[in-house]
Amino acid sequence: MAVNTVGVTNATPERMLLDAGAIYKNLTFDELTGDFTGEVMGATSGGNEFQVEIETRAPELDGVKTRIRGLKFVNSHEAQLTVNLKELTAQNIKNAIGPADIDETDDNFDIITGRSAIKDADYLDNVSFVGRLSGSQKPVVIMLKNALSAEGFTLTSEDDNEAIVPIVFHAHADFEDIESGKVAYEIYWPKEVVA
């Protein structure tokens, strides 16, 4: 059997993730219909970035000079989604700050105030990237559970441009997931259509 010197196959055009996608909060999946519903956070600019960081360790064993299959353990498994939000609302700014409150009692302004403690209500059920795979009508969904932005808030403005607020959302496991070893993100990848 010969091997190819390029990775392109006739399936390549069906397997590309296209464009910047959309960012949703509190997305839900209906297993009966196979549909997602949720609230779009707003327009983004400059794309969005999903990142999983896994820290591993291998025990040091006398006489062993190489890695050994089965002797590597996960110390941490962290997921984050960086959203470059261009559409700003009071709620989006509150979500970007994380531990904050919105006072809506003023007739003219929503007043957003940060606080020094994180409340359970600060966590969004999830924040999700929804993108499009070139060979499917179904979306690609990357869902961070119990999402919280707690890295701070940066707003930069300049002439002849609109402000972009980068928000780094971190996924957080539920207490009941700790024992089972589940991590706090899911990737819904459309099944390939077999011709």
Image: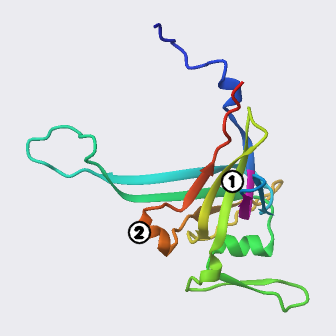
Determine which residue is flagged by label 1: 129
Specify whether residue 173 is painted magenta.
no
Q: Position of residue 114 (x, y in %)?
A: 64, 83
Q: Position of residue 1 (x, y in %)?
A: 46, 7
Relative placement, left or right, of 64 versus 12 is left
Extreme residue in the left direction: 63
Q: Residue at x 76, y 43 (%)?
A: 138
Relative placement, left or right, of 191 versus 71 is right
Q: CA distance from mark 2 to mark 1?
A: 27 Å
Q: Position of residue 187 (x, y in %)?
A: 60, 50
Specify whether residue 23 is painted magenta.
yes
Q: Secondary structure beneath disc 1?
A: strand
Q: Residue at x 60, y 61 (%)?
A: 144
Hey, what amino acid is under mark 1? Phe
Is 62 drawn above or below residue 128 in the view shown? above
Q: Residue at x 29, y 49 (%)?
A: 72
Q: Nearer the viewer, residue 150 or 144?
A: 144
Q: Position of residue 73 (x, y in %)?
A: 31, 53
Determine which residue is flagged by label 2: 179
Q: Nearer the viewer, residue 154 or 139?
A: 139
**Mark 2–mark 1 contact, CB under 8 Å?**
no
Query: What span is in magenta?
Result: 22-30
Q: Residue at x 8, y 41 (%)?
A: 63
Q: Nearer the viewer, mark 2 or mark 1?
A: 2
Hey, what amino acid is under mark 2? Glu
